Amino acid sequence: MVSDADKRKAAQLNEEGLLRYRHWELDEAIAAFRKAIEINPEQPDYHLNLARALVRYGDYEGTLKALGSFLRLESDPELVERFERLFGTALDAVESLLITTMLEHNVPLEMIGSSIQMWMEYRIAVGRHPLDVRNPAPWAAAIDLTVRKVNFREVPLKQIAEWYGTSPAAVRKRHLELISTLDIMPCDYRYFRQEQNPLDKLVEAASMFEELEERFRKL
């Protein structure tokens, strides 16, 4: 039996984890969610939030384990059904459409893989928020567009929409949702598949500047 005091402590840790997650302090977020689960293991949201942090961290095995715990505790049948699909081996409608259309337009396999990864990570990161995939075309088009932009292989929005048989407005809406939910940035390491990532130079320059500043201040 979890006491009220322990429930409050676990809820506080969960809120701390969410704050850390939003700021990309993933080690701290994961630790906070795990502590919350240790105190109150019957709260499904703590397991779901842990899964969201782990998938952003790139720990897919841990993500599935956390989702499994969430599914054992969750009572919403629609939500359970949605997340159970992540454990299946069959492609969903968005993935099938993505692969078919991207192959038709000679997209490298590495970028197609990034697209499938992005869709999987989005479905987890969106958490309890509703996810309407009755029409897969806008989602597939938005993912294609987003991965292309990350990898500097852009195609006009109107052209992408035509390939998938949907409207530019619908694609734009979902593109913005992907960027917001996954916190995607230019050249994002998670989805960038070109030979050299320009962000490497920025990291190197920042490190060099830090060294120069340290030497400058040293007496």
Image (cartoon, rainbow, N blue to C red):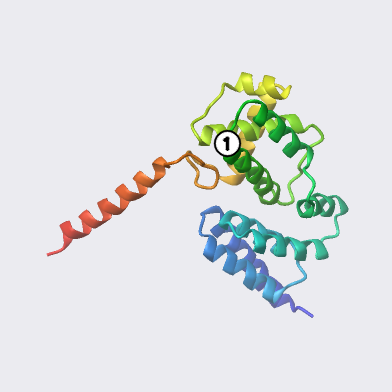
| Front residue of 37 and 147 | 147
Image quadrant occupied by the C terminus: bottom left
Q: Name the residue located 66 percent from the left edge and 62 percent from the top edge.
A: 61
Q: Position of residue 36 (x, y in %)?
A: 66, 70
Residue 167 visible in image? yes
Q: Position of residue 217 (x, y in %)?
A: 17, 59
Q: Secondary structure at mark 1?
A: helix
Residue 48 position by quadrant: bottom right
23 sits to left or right of 70: left
| Front residue of 144 and 216 | 144
Residue 139 visible in image? no
Residue 97 position by quadrant: top right
Q: Position of residue 68 (x, y in %)?
A: 76, 63
Residue 93 position by quadrant: top right
Q: Is residue 4 above or below residue 50?
A: below
Outermost residue, left side: 219
51 sits to left or right of 56: right
| Front residue of 160 and 210 | 160
Image quadrant occupied by the N terminus: bottom right
| Front residue of 156 and 7 | 156
Q: Position of residue 202 (x, y in %)?
A: 35, 45
Outermost residue, right side: 77
Q: Is residue 14 above or below residue 169?
A: below
Q: Is residue 93 above or below residue 206?
A: above
Q: Which residue is mark 1?
A: 147
- Count how many numbered circles sit on residues in the image: 1
Give the amino acid at mark 1: Val
Q: Residues within 10 Å of mark 1 (few under 14, many from 20)?
A: many
Q: Name the residue located 56 percent from the left edge and 57 percent from the top edge.
A: 57
